[in-house]
Amino acid sequence: MTIQELDYFIEVARVGSIGQAGANLYVSPQAISKAIKNLENSLKHELFSRNSKGVRLTVFGEAFLQEVLPIMQSINGLSDFGKKYSIKEDNSLRVYLDTINSYSYRVNLFTQQYRCEHPGIAIRSESVRITSDQPLHDDLCDIMFLCNRPGLVNAQKCECFTLFSSNTVAIANRKHPICNTTLLHWSGFSGIPVFLRSEEVYYAQSIINKCVNSGFYPNLSYRGDMMLDPFYFVANNDGIAFVPDFVAEFFMKLSPEICVLDFDTGIVTDYIFAVRRSEKKERKERIEHYINYVECRLKSNGRVMAIF
């Protein structure tokens, strides 16, 4: 008596036809008949009575079916568990890379950091062309790095994403335990989804670059265009980013057209600045003029807030 024979028996009992059962299971009717015959020889009882319309269970066959069904359900459950375990818990992190970002410097830095923090976890990466309507399934991957496109996150309907730069989005599967540790902290995923214009990312990033490169803030680790410690942006309508709830609520109440940067070292908030949207040239001049003031305050580890 084998599991395959029991599978054949259950299917024949379900459809009442050896020929139809064979078609459903993609095996020949002869193979089905042979399996049923082997079962009947093992049990020393007939399982089906045959008539012109097909087959029907005997009294013994009906009783045997009731015994077999819960056993086979348990076996199928164990098989599903094995498949799930091999996908989700095999000490690997599955990464999909949009073909545009396959050789992205920031992605390479993330994988390097991840290997350092989780030496026992293998990273399986694959370069694919990911479309905006391609969902993040549990059995697909754990993290996607995509080229930012209009409507991307709305199409994904995904809670866990972050803006790596003005043109790269990382979308993570929150159900993955690994993503809930290193990745969420490293990329600053915690918070609420808000929107940001790409040019405002550029201007805000220029201040971070200036501050880090100046040496006034030596405790920061800088990786390409991404900080080790989370930083957040707030604005309205275009692009994507994450901010802590209280920062978003506070500044959004001030004005729906405010761009906010909250840089948190993990100890204290050293500065917060907000830039009201205006003409690009005017905003750029004001931010560049403001850089020196920010750097001076960073020397004393103080807090800076300015609204233009």
Image: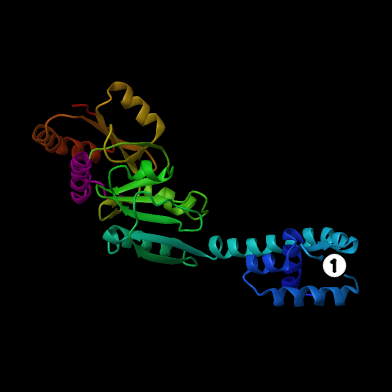
Q: Which residue is mark 1?
A: 47
State whether residue 273 is above or below residue 9: above
Name the quarter where the C terminus is drawn. top left
- Residue 303 image position (x, y, % from top left): 28, 33
The residue shown at (87%, 62%) is 58
Whether residue 142 appears in this view of the structure is yes
- Residue 55 image position (x, y, % from top left): 79, 64
Query: Which span is picked out in magenta?
Result: 198-220
In which image quadrant can residue 11 be found?
bottom right
- Residue 275 image position (x, y, % from top left): 21, 31
Name the quarter where the N terminus is drawn. bottom right
Front residue (pair 54, 65)? 54
How many labels were placed on the picture? 1
State whether residue 72 is above or below residue 4: above
Q: In what element is the residue under mark 1? A: loop
- Residue 289 image position (x, y, % from top left): 11, 35
What sort of colour scheme is used for the picture? Answer: rainbow
The residue shown at (35%, 56%) is 130
| Residue 200 falls inside the magenta stretch | yes
The residue shown at (88%, 73%) is 43
The residue shown at (35%, 60%) is 97
Whether residue 230 appears in this view of the structure is no
State whether residue 160 is above or below residue 251: below
